[in-house]
Image (spheres, helix red, strand yellow):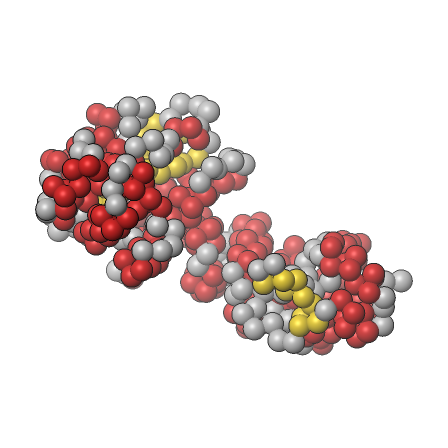
């Protein structure tokens, strides 16, 4: 393996060759996916895909100015003896040459994980050897991986494109991606403590993109696969596309699955500052949801969280609280007054108040406000280290607690 003191020689290599050599260098001791699994790990499959959204953004930033999540690649070269300029040039050459991702999927009874590698537009023997080599000496079945790589090359030679470029598991494209979605969700539900959730988010994004491409081609995906695909979209942070997909599945998704999906999509929307978009979806489709499903407490709670995070008008939030109380008065009084469901998540939260200003607005003491801020039981907007109280959200909160006498 070439070392960085011979970097000048590497810099004269063809881009794909250079990228391959650099990728080997950066892989030294940096990644052990097998540390994840306590049980027997197995080779699952391999696929070619575009860059994930997260990697695409990081790659563009690194190529533009050398900063961002990929900046450490240059640091690795410098530690091996390259000058800062040589290290940055080499790393940029690698990511410039890359055209997508080659993803090796591992699995066991606890879930799935991936070994993602850069793909440089060809499946020549040298690159296939590199893929196997980068999986490391602990890889459970290199023979199966080589067979899958050979099948992958045959598919590529047949001019197949994403999402059909996969091998090693189910041969047909729709069952492959649906099965992979099921495996990913099963691992999440099994409580697997994953050391690198970004890899699962990338896998979820590829699964969602594959199903979108399948549907765009006019092919039909079984309705039973919809909940798992939606879970993947939630994990990938694709809020609006996930709500649009869920809308198409109203009436076909089981009650429990629907409530779980709505809770998770709402949480993702809030975490990503997309609560207003989620609230608009809820307001538009609530009649269709209530017509297809019973107005369960959990369904209404999922709605309330999103509306509170979006700072809807006080009258609308009071009406949502009324529905909660009607569905389960005891649980509603607990959730509305004691649980942290008041986080405001909007790109523009409007006027922000400090503790004293909030106390004056609601007619309480600053200590009253401070205690509820700490508990998360009053509207709060966080921006970096700053924690403030959004006025619109506070007024809606005040209307709810007064309407239901939650402070008595």
Q: Residue furthest right?
A: 408
Whether residue 175 is situated above or below residue 364 in the rendered picture: above
* The quarter of the displayed image where residue 258 is located: bottom right
Which residue is found at the position 31% from the left and 60% from the top? 65
**Residue 390: quadrant of the picture:** bottom right
Residue drawn at (38%, 51%) of the image: 69
Where is residue 80? Give x, y as percent.
28, 36
* Along the line of sight, the residue nearer the viewer: 373 or 2: 2
- Between 124 and 283, the one lying in front of the other is 124
Residue 151 spot, x, y in % from top left: 17, 37
Identified at 17% across, 41% down, the residue is 7
Q: Is residue 101 visible?
A: no
Residue 154 lies left or right of residue 172; in this view the side is left
Measuring from the top left, give residue 22's x and y in whole percent.
22, 41
| Left-right relation of 129 to 305 | left
Image quadrant assignment for residue 273: bottom right
For residue 243, say whether it is visible.
yes
- Residue 386 against residue 253 in the figure, above or below: below
Count all numbered tags in the image, as a single digit.
0
Q: Residue at x 21, y 54 (%)?
A: 96
Considering depth in this image, is 394 or 217 the residue closer to the camera? 394
Q: Is residue 175 left or right of residue 263?
A: left
Check the image and report above or below for 306 versus 338: below
- For the C terminus, give its image quadrant: bottom right
Q: Foreground: 204 or 32?
A: 32
Where residue 1 sits: x, y (%)?
18, 31
């Amino acid at each position: 393996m070439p070392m960085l003191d011979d970097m000048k020689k590497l810099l004269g290599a063809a881009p794909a060759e250079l990228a391959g050599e650099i990728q080997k260098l950066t892989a030294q001791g940096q990644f052990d996916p097998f540390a994840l699994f306590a049980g027997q790990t197995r080779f699952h499959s391999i696929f070619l895909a575009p860059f994930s959204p997260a990697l695409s953004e990081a790659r563009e930033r690194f190529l533009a100015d050398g900063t961002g999540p990929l900046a450490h690649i240059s640091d690795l070269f410098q530690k091996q003896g390259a000058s800062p300029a040589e290290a940055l040039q080499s790393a940029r050459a690698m990511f410039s040459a890359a055209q997508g991702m080659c993803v090796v999927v591992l699995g066991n009874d606890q879930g799935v994980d991936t070994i993602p590698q850069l793909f440089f537009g060809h499946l020549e023997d040298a690159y296939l050897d590199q893929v196997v080599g980068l999986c490391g000496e602990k890889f459970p079945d290199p023979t199966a991986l080589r067979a899958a790589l050979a099948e992958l090359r045959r598919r590529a030679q047949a001019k197949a494109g994403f999402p059909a470029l996969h091998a090693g598991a189910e041969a047909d494209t729709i069952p492959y991606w649906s099965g992979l979605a099921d495996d990913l969700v099963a691992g999440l539900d099994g409580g697997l403590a994953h050391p690198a959730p970004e890899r699962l988010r990338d896998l979820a994004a590829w699964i969602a993109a594959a199903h979108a491409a399948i549907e765009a081609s006019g092919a039909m995906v079984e309705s039973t696969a919809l909940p798992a695909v939606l879970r993947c979209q939630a994990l990938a942070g694709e809020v609006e596309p996930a709500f649009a997909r869920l809308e198409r599945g109203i009436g076909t998704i089981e009650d429990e699955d629907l409530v779980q999906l709505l809770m998770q999509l709402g949480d993702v929307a809030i975490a990503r500052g997309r609560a207003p978009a989620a609230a608009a979806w809820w307001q538009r489709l609530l009649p269709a949801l209530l017509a297809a499903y019973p107005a369960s407490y959990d369904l209404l709670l999922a709605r309330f969280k999103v509306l509170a995070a979006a700072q809807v008008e006080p009258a609308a939030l009071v009406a949502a609280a009324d529905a909660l109380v009607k569905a389960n008065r005891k649980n509603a009084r607990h959730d509305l007054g004691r649980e942290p469901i008041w986080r405001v998540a909007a790109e523009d939260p409007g006027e922000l108040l400090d503790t004293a200003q909030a106390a004056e607005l609601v007619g309480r003491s600053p200590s009253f406000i401070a205690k509820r801020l700490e508990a998360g039981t009053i509207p709060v907007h966080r921006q970096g280290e700053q924690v403030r109280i959004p006025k619109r959200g506070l007024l809606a909160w005040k209307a709810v607690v007064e309407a239901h006498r939650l402070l008595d």
